[in-house]
Amino acid sequence: MTFLPDAERPDLTLGFVPLLDAALLVIAREAGFFADQGLDVTLARQNTWSALRDKVAAGLLDGAQMLAPMPLAMSLGLGRAPCETLAPVTLSRNGNALVLAERLAEASHAHLAVDPARGARALAAALPTLPRPPRLAMVYPYSCQHYQLRHWLDLGGLDPQRDVELVVLPPPRMVEAMEAGEIDGFCVGEPWGSLAQHRGAGRIVATGAQLWPEAPEKVLGVTRSWARCYPATLARLIVALQRAGDWLAADPGHARRTLEWLALPPYLDRSVAHLSRLPLNETPIRQRLCGSEVLRPDPQAAASVAEHLDQALRREGRRLDLASLRACHDPVHYDRALHQAGAEDTEGGTPPAPQPDSNPM
């Protein structure tokens, strides 16, 4: 029998950006799944993806919720000095919304449709009537949001270099920037797209689930050196996140409880006040956070995202090799941790999954 050894580093700090797909990290902390694995985890809210990336690389964070392309981009040295980084758990699939400012959506008659190309073609048709090219925001150059935004523009025959202006903004800045007229649209993870629509500032015209169905969106990212130093700690992190996902899937009431936790000030605070429930796997966003088919890393699913990184490398005279992709998204850590935890549970070495009490803190 194989058992999970004690964590080499029980006190951890994990970074996150305020988005709904930080949910498994929040559940694992608030419901006690991290504690059940002997881990004392602090969740540190970060303002920007670049700051989160640099803190993980510098060892100031033990790991973090990351954009799915980010660990591979870090490993390849895209956007910063190379830092070999792994994605041992997928935290979400789908979850992005593409939003146009209400004034632009009204002028172009763009709206959410079964075919996302309709909104893109509507924007293209309205382009000659606009006083300037639309300024559209995404969250990070090496992100699904950036590539999905480009994909959507391409469906309408729009050239991102000529027909629009692309800028980078942190997710929490998107809605207020739209309200101030600083940007005319954006692609971002929830809850920011639905918040813009709720406030009347913007209109959802397409989703990541339409453009790239079931694509990995966020992952747990750790550096390769950290994983080598703390293999048992990583295994226990993986087990805690898996059990958080199992708990979320077990009862509809657990989704409501999760939304209450996400609404706490350390996490997403007032940005989820417009949500009456946690909208999991519902149209149009169809965000998925539960199940082994979601959490287990899948190099093949990551390959579609990696194609866009390959294009960035080609501009530098480089090529993406499949070995780098496989090493980054290899499910070996996930499979080993779950196998070890399964053996341990058989022997009764792990208490049953905790149930949260009525107090969210």
Image (cartoon, rainbow, N blue to C red):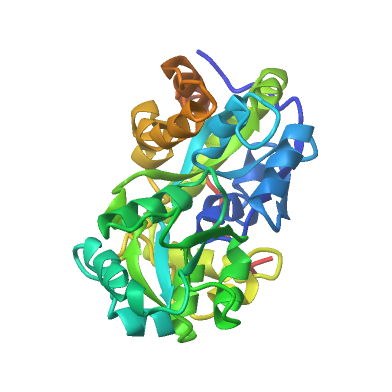
Point 54% across, 72% down: residue: 183
Q: In the rendered view, does 287 fall on the left or right side of 336?
A: left
Q: In the rendered view, does 70 fall on the left or right side of 159?
A: right
x then y, percent, for residue 41 = 72, 45
Point 57% across, 19% down: residue: 3
Point 58% across, 62% down: residue: 171
232 w.r.t. 50: above or below: above
**Picture quadrant of residue 149:** bottom left
x then y, percent, for residue 280 = 37, 61
Point 42% across, 18% down: residue: 322
x then y, percent, for residue 245 = 46, 48
- Is residue 142 visible in the rendered image? The answer is yes
Q: In the rendered view, does 145 fall on the left or right side of 235?
A: left
Quadrant of the frame with the C terminus: bottom right
Between 252 and 224, the one lying in front of the other is 224
195 w.r.t. 287: above or below: below
73 w.r.t. 129: above or below: above
Residue that protrudes farthest toward the left in the picture: 114
Between 169 and 241, the one lying in front of the other is 169
